[in-house]
Amino acid sequence: MPDYEKIPDDPEQAALKAEKRKPKQKLLGIHRYGGKLLYMWYGMRFGTLMKLFARGRFDFTTNCIPDVLTLVLWCPINTPLYLLSELIYRRRIKNVKLDKEPVFVIGHWRTGTTFLHDLLASDPNTAYPTTYECFFPHHFLITERTLSRIMKVLLPKKRPQDDVPVGFDRPQEEEFGVIMMGQGSPLNTMAWPRHGPVDSDYVDFEGVPEKKRKAWFDAYLWFYKRLMVRHDKPLILKSPANSARVRYLLERFPNARFIYITRNPLDVYPSTVKLWRALYSTQGLHNPPYVSGWLDDYVLDMMQRLTDRYQADRHLIPEQNLYEIRYEDLVKDPIGRLSEMYDKLRIGDFSQAEPKMRALLDARSEHQTSQYELPADIKARILERMGPHMERYGYLDQPGQAAPQQPAAETEQPA
């Protein structure tokens, strides 16, 4: 299926893009779209892993068997490490104080949440969940300093969906920690992409029974407490799906601060297609993922669902605890916007954070953003479905992006 990315004019860059797209038959393997990436499922306890396998009806492809076998050999180790960690830290976990309210970075995937999260996480007076902590939530308290160093050789230098650096010590989405505990998430689609989307209702918990919703947030708080034991600083948390969970997060963190970042949906849509295409390939327990029958519609449906739910619930956040920003404005003046953000949300002393933020910006000054070209019919669908959102944040004012006329009643088709 297309990923709508333009081929660069530079022949060398064009060749690299083509290489990532081209499947290559190998012994017991197929070149994964975007390159090789370590399975994230290694953080599951063995019983959780078996439930994941059963959910996909053990529909492995032969080329994935070697990696699946390493999962089967590794995951049983997580349970004794978990028991040891809980024994050592039991008292500290029981007595941990949750008086340092978190800052939630929210916004749809590919709106700049990672960029913003990285900037905020560079502040030495705040903390963030690391990739290792999110992938190994059961025992990171006792293993992070050793196993992360050993396993880092298995990671690529950059993510398959873009050129953002990868590392076990880098900021990560806490959603992965909840997944490792066997809870529902749209990200579980990565395991069995050929079977289509799963757990879509967990993006906003509409249709999820109350018992399962409670279990999900119990797991979330379980992980959060252990992160606080590790860091004992205000946490900067980033998970795009949390954009649709504001009401439930406020029940547990009534004084939390929220930073909502948005970006032109005409740019977000193709970038998200590329994201899922890459992750379904690298994380799938069968490969290639074969997603052309559903991915385009799924991305648009989830984009509208997430943004609509955020707009419906944003009024629940006290005005002084919410800061909204467009990605386009952030990249134009990152330091100015971050200073404004710190001031409104009372995050801390910006003068102490600014040097680290400037250093990160300098390090990424050569980062190239992918360019995309959408077919007219898909562009029209995005404008129709996301029109209210685009109007609210000023995207319909841009040339060539007027909202399409609504179809006549007799020709209107169901969504």
Image: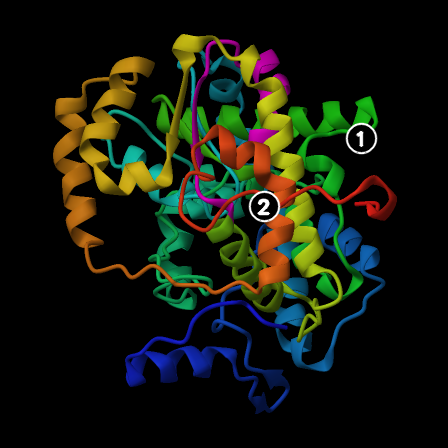
- As drawn, is 300 to the left or to the right of 132? right
| Vertical position of residue 229 compared to residue 358: above or below | above
Question: By what rule are the colours in the image chosen?
Answer: rainbow
Contact, mark 2 vs mark 1 (Cβ under 8 Å): no
Residue 45 shows in the view: no
Residue 105 versus residue 214 in the image, above or below = below
Q: Horizontal and vertical percent for residue 66?
A: 64, 77
Query: From which residue to which does the magenta span run?
Result: 243-265
Q: Within the magenta stretch, is there residue 200?
A: no
- Give amino acid for label 2: Leu
Residue type, label 1: Val
Residue receiving disc 1: 208
- Residue 368 in view in this figure: yes
Please tell me which residue lies in front, 409 or 286.
409
Q: Position of residue 282 (x, y in %)?
A: 57, 67
- Quadrant holding the C terminus: top right
Q: Position of residue 310 (x, y in %)?
A: 58, 26
Q: Few, some or many C-alpha atoms within 10 Å of disc 1 (few <14, some 14-19, many ≥20)? A: some
Secondary structure found at label 2 = helix
Secondary structure found at label 1: loop
Q: Is residue 352 above or below residue 277?
A: above
Locate residue 62: give its quadrant.
bottom right
Dot 2: few (<14), some (14–19), or many (≥20) neighbours within 10 Å? many
Q: Which residue is mark 2?
A: 383
